[in-house]
Amino acid sequence: MALATVWIKFWEAVLTIGFGSFAILVLIVIPLGARDVFRLFKKLDAGSSQNEDSRD
Amino acid sequence: MFETQFTNLDWGIVVVYLVGTGVFGMYVNKHVHNASDYLVGGRGAGTALSIASFIGTGLGLVTLMYASMDGFTKGFSYLVVPLIAFAVYLFLGTSGFAIKRLREMKLTTLPEYFEKRFSRRARITSGLIAVLAGVLNMGLFPKMGATFITYATGLGGENAELTVNLITTLLIVMVLVYTVMGGMVAVLVTDYIQFLVLSLGLGLGLWFCFTDLDSHLGWANMVSTWQETKGEAAFNPVHAESYGWTYFFWQIVLVFTAGICWAPEATRALTTQDSATTKRTFLFGAPGFFVRMAIPAVWGIAAYTYVFHHPELHEYFLGENTAGHASQAMPLLLGKIIPTGLLGLLVAGLLAAFMSTHDSYLLSWASIISQDIIAPLKGVKELSDQQSIFYTRVSVVLIGIFLLIWGIWYELPESVWTYMSITGMVYLSGSATALIGGMYWKRASTTGALWAMYGGLLAISGLFVEPIQDWYEAEYGASITYWFNGPSLTLAIFGICILLFVAGSLLFPNREQLLTAQENE
């Protein structure tokens, strides 16, 4: 097998694994990321009210 | 020749999307209550949001542009760079090497580490060099983004310099307003939205590259075209006519050190809830750091295939100035093969990518100016919340003004990725040596750290490599490109930084180290 052919097979495999794993990642991150956004807002607002309480 | 399928409908989609994201970014500002919220999002980002933001930051329009340029000129061989990134982030995510300790130290910025481990002077020096390298590094971002918009929307032509400059200005103003108003919370949240839209856009572009057989694209066509025109060099990255071994090792060093201490990306290690989240972010972010360069590289490979099969484009793209026009090929390809409507969505997503990279970069460098340069120079441990936000915002605007001047006047180099790698090494070679050495070598001293950082400044000489190569060839009639080039020079400088670090630490240990040694005696 020519060296170029080996490289072509190699890049084909690399792209399949790389793109495939990213597709799975996207499917997981999108719903869980939305949940994290709301949690972040809650945490920031809670931190702020705690600070105000401690000042009082 | 430069017409695309971009219509008024697509402009409408872009405007609605940008205005919507901008309004949302400002809306989330109401959750920002102090400097910690503004600079590191209150350290409240969970794993999924961190991953989205981590990838959103790295996946800028400029990334897509430089990767596609190298894909267009070097073919499949460029895929070795995303592959290295994939391996490096997997390693960092599984081992937690350096990033875990950084998070545990509860830092706001990376240079803060140098004060905790070495001295205030080390922090200021690191901050100054980080900002110098970082701002130079992002100097070409706006122009790259504007080039994309110009050619993907069909506004481009053989003399589209003025259009590119006008769009550059508009983009900088937009991103400045957005960053100044929102801070890190806006960055985190809009990065998430952009991750969502971009994932769709990247997949869409890839789909058309692999399936549009009428345009002579598709995997088989791309492979055969490159094999026919460039042979093995198109696929083998270490081939003599491709990148070569030096470039390969240079990229491993660069990607590894950037993952640990390149502020815009490494700051994500500081914004997470805990060190376990930091490790997970790097581990699960690895595929994102692969696709952010691999997908545009495939677009560039497809653009070359498209141009090769369209004789009317040969003179412009495959003539004497191939490298000079490489930045225009990928946007033109997408504009031609993606249908109206979907094209608007893709351009909106990529513009959003432009914004997400800029806001993160601007905020990273500006917060280093306020926290690591201004605060220590004022002699205070930390600035008040109001001062912090004020100085950060002023710095954002000043960097924006520099970007405007640099972006308009500086000509795009042959390989933007190489330019970015060299400018990155100005900071990385010295600071990464001091950071890793400081963490894992007890005898590391302040003098060693400072010497290493100063040594890194030598990497600026990498920007003058091409004129020196040209001068030598004209003067002596021989080429020195093989052994004197950006990668070999900056790798050598990295080695010098390590030597300086070791020598400085051994010759000038810190006072407490001397005391400990005396006590032991």
Image (cartoon, helix red, strand yellow):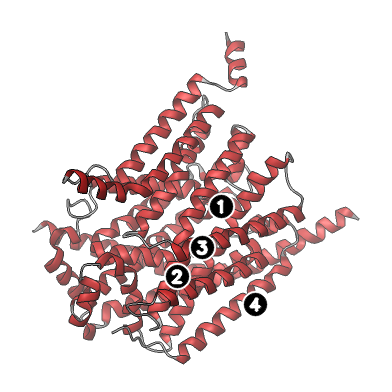
Q: CA distance from mark 1 to mark 2?
A: 23 Å
Q: CA distance from mark 4 to mark 1?
A: 25 Å
Quick check: B166 above or below B450? below
Where residue B289 is drawn, which disc sits there? none
Q: Chain of mark 2?
A: B
x and y, in percent, of residue B430 in the image = 46, 38
Going by the numbered disc 3, the residue's amino acid type is Ile
In this rendering, do the residues under marks 1 and 2 share a single chain?
yes
Going by the numbered disc 1, the residue's amino acid type is Thr
Secondary structure of the residue carrying tag 3 is: helix
- Mark 1 — residue? B267
Please tell me how crowded label 4 is: few (under 14), some (14-19), or many (20+) other residues with Cα within 10 Å: few
x and y, in percent, of residue B58 in the image = 47, 61
Secondary structure of the residue carrying tag 4 is: helix
Going by the numbered disc 4, the residue's amino acid type is Val
Please tell me how crowded label 1 is: few (under 14), some (14-19), or many (20+) other residues with Cα within 10 Å: many
Pointer 4 or 1: first along the chain: 4
Pointer 2 or 4: first along the chain: 4
Viewer-side label of 3, 2 = 3
Where residue B405 is drawn, which disc sits there? 3
Pointer 1 or 2: first along the chain: 2
Pointer 1 or 3: first along the chain: 1
Viewer-side label of 1, 3 = 3
x and y, in percent, of residue B66 in the image = 36, 63
Q: Chain of mark 1?
A: B
In the drawing, does residue B352 fall left or right of residue B85? Answer: right
